[in-house]
Each structure stands twice: as structure tokens, then as C-alpha cells.
């Protein structure tokens, strides 16, 4: 039987939201639907600019009478400031509790949730079932009592697991402030709701969904040699069509213009990065083809 592995994610931070209007505040600004937390343990969501680009990327889990938001540690202060700006007269309090929590990912093998009364908040990663569980606890020593049989692993092993599944991470595979939700696979990972009411940037997201105008996507790639450093340009002939993100040996994730990749593939021109040949390997869980459908004609 496979053994569970657990990695401490040192680059993650945590905010706490409490108060009667906490859920209402979030519902009005995030990409996902807070009502899903009535039946699900956690959400993955984003907060967008009015132009529809991702400013913040995070998980939301219930915690007592409020919520915990797990996000990039470097983004936590700015996310708190943004939520405070939207709070206005809402009866809600937002606190940066990064110093009070350790964040970890657990994957592979059997898993036992935290025991009742434990300060650990655990939830299945909602982006893909094979990603496993995430845990927020006040003491790192609690991992061994809360997760039976889990072996410690370096953070790089978690990212290798994530790369193999094909799930992107903000800051590693797409740039915050310069990426539309579809480009970051929000429509594939259940990170955006197309049925909830309005939220910041919603019109742009809906337009991209209905007109199928997402030409750029983060996709898994495989090379015939060791991949170079993240951020390297991906070329088709002399044309730059993408950027390399997370890397694990010969495998990685890259943000690529799929329409251009398909065009050059039809011409027999390979993709390369630092003279290393690349192939796009779409995972079986995504619903888009290598060549995106033609945009719907406007009426």
C-alpha cells in the first residue's frame, strides 16, 4: 500500500475572517460560490481586478464560526488590505494569522483526518482529487499525531506531484495581476462559479467562457532533456509562444498560446526551450483540446 507523504509549505500564509457578514463579504468579491461550503470542506478561489485578471489566489475553509484563507505568504498582507477595502460597513473582521499556523500538504496512501478538538484544520484539495489534503495547524509537531503513517517529504516533492497531475500554482506557473482565470485553469479546477451572482471581474470571465476566447493555458510539458529554469521562453521556430513555469527534471508546466502551438504543430515545427525539444501533454481531466475552438460569432 502506498505511503502517505507530507510536506510543510513554508511559503503559505493564513488570514482569519470572522463576524456575521464574513460569508456575504467573500461571496460578493471572489470567483467561487460560498454556498458550496454548506456541503464541501473547502473552496479554491480567486479575487480579480475589475479587468478580470487574478490578483489573489487562495483556499477558503470553515474554522469555528468564521473562515480561514490560505494564500501565498507574500500575498497575505495585500489580500488583507484588499478585503478591508471591500469590507466597508460589513460586520466582519479580517486578521493576518500567518504566525499562528503551519501549512502542509499530504498526498498518496491512506489518510486520517485530524481528530475531534484538534487545532488542525484539514481539507481535501478541491482542485483535483489526486492532490490529497491540506492542513493548517498551530504546531508542526501535530502532523505526526493527526496524520497516521505520513512520511515527511521536502516541499519540492509536493510540487513534483502537482506538476505530474498538471495543476498550476500562482506565482510559479502564472503571474498574479497579469493572468485571466481561464489561462490559470480556473474553469477546469472548479475555482470559478458560472452560476453565482456578480463578483469583481465577473463580466470578463463570463465573456471568455461563452465566447471560448481562452487561447493561452497552463499545460504540462515533457522535454527530451532536463528543463531549464522557470521563466525561460518557449519558442516555435523563432516565435515566442509561451513561458516555462514549475519544473521537475524533464517534466514541467508552461503557459502557452495553444492556438499558436497547434498552428506550428500542423507545420511540423517543434516547440523548444533553450534548444531542448518540448511536447505538450494534456492531462485527461481537462476539457479543452490542444487547438481551442473557434470563438463564437458575436450577435
Image (cartoon, rainbow, N blue to C red):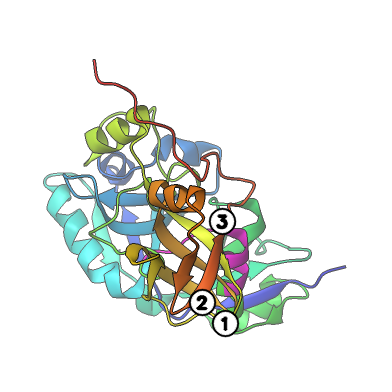
Is 92 rendered above or below residue 16?
Answer: above
Viewer-nearest of discs 3 and 2: 2
Viewer-nearest of discs 3 and 1: 1
Callout 2–callout 1 Cβ contact below 8 Å:
yes
**Residue 165 locus on image (x, y percent):** 61, 60
Is residue 155 within the magenta segment?
Answer: no
The residue lying furthest to the right in this view is: 1
Callout 3–callout 1 Cβ contact below 8 Å:
no
**First-in-chain label (2 vs 1):** 1
Viewer-nearest of discs 2 and 1: 2
Residue indicated by mark 3: 125
**Residue 197 locus on image (x, y percent):** 30, 28
**First-in-chain label (3 vs 2):** 3
Judging depth in this view, the residue of 278 and 162 nearest the camera is 278
Q: Secondary structure at mark 1?
A: loop
Residue range of the region highlighted in magenta in the rendering: 160-170
Judging depth in this view, the residue of 191 and 13 nearest the camera is 191
Q: Could you tell me how far apart the alpha carbons at marks 2 and 1 are, in whole angstroms?
A: 8 Å
Residue indicated by mark 1: 226
Is residue 169 within the magenta segment?
Answer: yes
Amino acid at each position: 500500500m502506498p505511503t502517505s507523504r507530507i510536506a510543510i509549505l513554508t511559503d503559505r500564509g493564513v488570514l482569519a475572517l470572522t463576524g456575521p457578514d464574513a460569508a456575504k463579504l467573500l461571496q460578493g468579491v471572489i470567483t467561487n460560490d460560498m454556498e458550496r461550503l454548506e456541503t464541501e470542506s473547502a473552496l479554491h478561489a480567486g479575487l480579480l481586478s475589475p479587468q478580470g485578471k487574478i490578483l489573489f489566489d487562495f483556499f477558503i475553509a470553515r474554522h469555528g464560526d468564521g473562515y480561514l484563507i490560505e494564500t501565498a505568504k507574500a500575498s497575505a498582507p495585500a489580500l488583507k488590505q484588499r478585503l478591508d477595502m471591500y469590507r466597508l460597513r460589513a460586520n466582519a473582521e479580517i486578521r493576518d494569522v500567518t504566525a499562528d499556523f503551519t501549512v502542509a500538504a499530504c498526498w498518496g496512501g491512506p489518510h486520517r483526518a485530524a481528530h475531534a478538538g484538534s487545532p488542525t484544520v484539514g481539507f481535501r484539495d478541491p482542485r483535483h482529487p489526486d492532490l490529497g489534503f491540506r492542513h493548517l495547524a498551530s504546531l508542526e509537531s501535530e502532523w505526526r499525531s493527526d496524520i497516521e503513517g505520513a512520511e515527511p517529504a521536502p516541499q519540492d516533492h509536493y510540487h513534483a506531484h502537482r506538476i505530474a497531475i498538471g495543476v498550476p500554482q500562482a506565482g510559479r506557473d502564472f503571474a498574479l495581476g497579469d493572468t485571466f482565470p481561464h489561462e490559470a485553469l480556473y474553469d477546469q479546477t472548479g475555482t470559478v462559479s458560472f452560476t453565482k451572482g456578480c463578483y469583481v471581474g465577473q463580466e470578463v470571465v463570463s465573456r471568455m467562457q461563452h465566447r471560448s476566447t481562452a487561447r493561452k493555458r497552463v499545460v504540462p510539458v515533457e522535454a527530451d532533456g532536463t528543463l531549464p529554469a522557470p521563466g525561460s521562453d518557449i519558442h516555435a521556430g523563432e516565435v515566442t509562444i509561451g513561458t516555462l513555469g514549475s519544473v521537475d527534471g524533464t517534466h514541467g508546466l508552461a503557459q502557452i498560446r495553444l492556438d499558436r502551438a497547434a498552428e506550428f504543430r500542423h507545420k511540423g515545427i517543434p516547440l523548444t526551450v533553450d534548444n531542448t525539444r518540448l511536447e505538450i501533454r494534456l492531462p485527461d481531466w481537462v476539457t479543452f483540446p490542444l487547438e481551442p475552438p473557434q470563438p463564437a460569432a458575436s450577435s
